[in-house]
Image (spheres, rainbow, N blue to C red):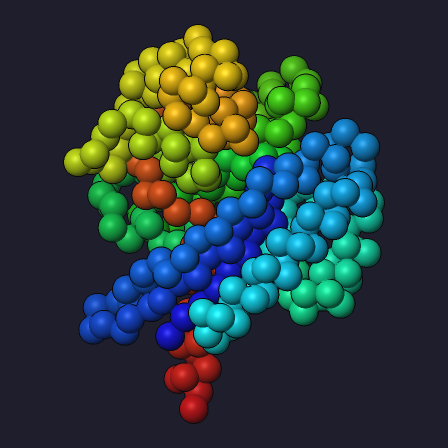
Amino acid sequence: MRFASIDIGSNAVRLLLSDFIESKRKPIFKKAEMVRVPLRLGEDAFLTGRITKVKINKLISAMKAFRNLMDAFDAVSYRACATSSMREAKNSSEIIKQIWREAKIKVELIDGKREADIIFSNHVEENLNKKNSYLYIDVGGGSTELTLFSKGKCLASQSFNIGTVRLLNKKVNKEYWDFFKAWIKLETKNIKQLVAIGSGGNINKLFRMSDKKNNRSVSYKKLKLLSEKIESYSYDDRIKKLGLKADRADVIVPASRIVLAVMKTAEIEEMIVPQIGLADGLIHELYEEYRNKKRKK
């Protein structure tokens, strides 16, 4: 059986098609296809408060393509969510209606708390050391979601309007950075053995660039050195010499600054990168719905 999820983010829109296989212990999810379109909706939303006609047309084209792919791949159900940039765009409700009219995709506009809950639904903590506490860090184009949990229980969760596209456009002031760090200090001050779990496209890319092929974690020290290396290159050289895509070569710098700030403030030395995100969390939610319906029959 195949599910589909759509993440309409501030930097890119993504379609994930995922198969699941029932097993005795727990379901196995296998990615069938992933499509990413770097629309940068946040550039409009964070600067002008609206998404322009040009970007809307591109978004509609992407949604039509996603609808066709979902049909071609025989997805039995889907969920589509829009996050930070659409939350702030004054014309988001009109855009969501247009997506339904032209692409027949229902889009749910979610707040930061709901976004964090979906990401947390990936259940990555189930496979981790129960003695440790974990700070889940999801860095997006418009916001960063932080979720603190210990022994499988969520202790605190907060969404902050600090994202890669916002930072590129200088839309985060010092006062908000201070608020961000103060929250981290307050929530983590009495917690020992704290480990970070990182998600989001830029964190995944940083992890792959760190050459940690046989491990799922990377140290703060290694990330800091890698970040300094990336920043030492010009935008063009990040593409030519580091092999980064054009739409990744700029946002990866503020992404590394965000994750390093979180780890330093919380005094975290290690980050686990399971390479999952919002789209994966939506797939897990679709599976839970399917399982609950099956039980009721």
Q: Is residue 30 left or right of residue 106?
A: left
Give the quadrant of the C terminus: bottom left
Residue 204 or residue 60, whichever sits in front: 60
User: Which residue shows up at 33% across the image and 31% down it?
Assistant: 207
The total of numbered circles placed on residues is 0
Farthest residue, direction top: 232
Give the quadrant of the N terminus: bottom left
User: Which residue shows up at 25% across the image and 37% down it?
Assistant: 216
Residue 190, compared with residue 2, is above or below; it is above
Residue 161 or residue 244, whichever sits in front: 244
Q: Position of residue 43 (x, y in %)?
A: 70, 32
Farthest residue, direction bottom: 297
Residue 189 or residue 79, whichever sits in front: 79
Using the rendered image of the protein, determine whether residue 236 is visible from the camera's viewpoint: yes
Q: Position of residue 264 (x, y in %)?
A: 41, 18
User: Which residue shows up at 26% across the image and 33% down it?
Assistant: 217
Residue 87, compared with residue 6, is above or below; it is above
Residue 31 or residue 24, whichever sits in front: 31
Q: Place residue 190 in its image quadrant.
A: top left
User: Which residue shows up at 62% across the image and 54% down it?
Assistant: 62
Q: Position of residue 211 (x, y in %)?
A: 25, 27
Farthest residue, direction front: 240
Q: Position of residue 94 (x, y in %)?
A: 81, 56
Residue 59, compared with residue 272, is above or below; it is below
Using the rendered image of the protein, determine whether residue 184 is visible from the camera's viewpoint: no
Q: Is residue 38 left or right of residue 90?
A: left
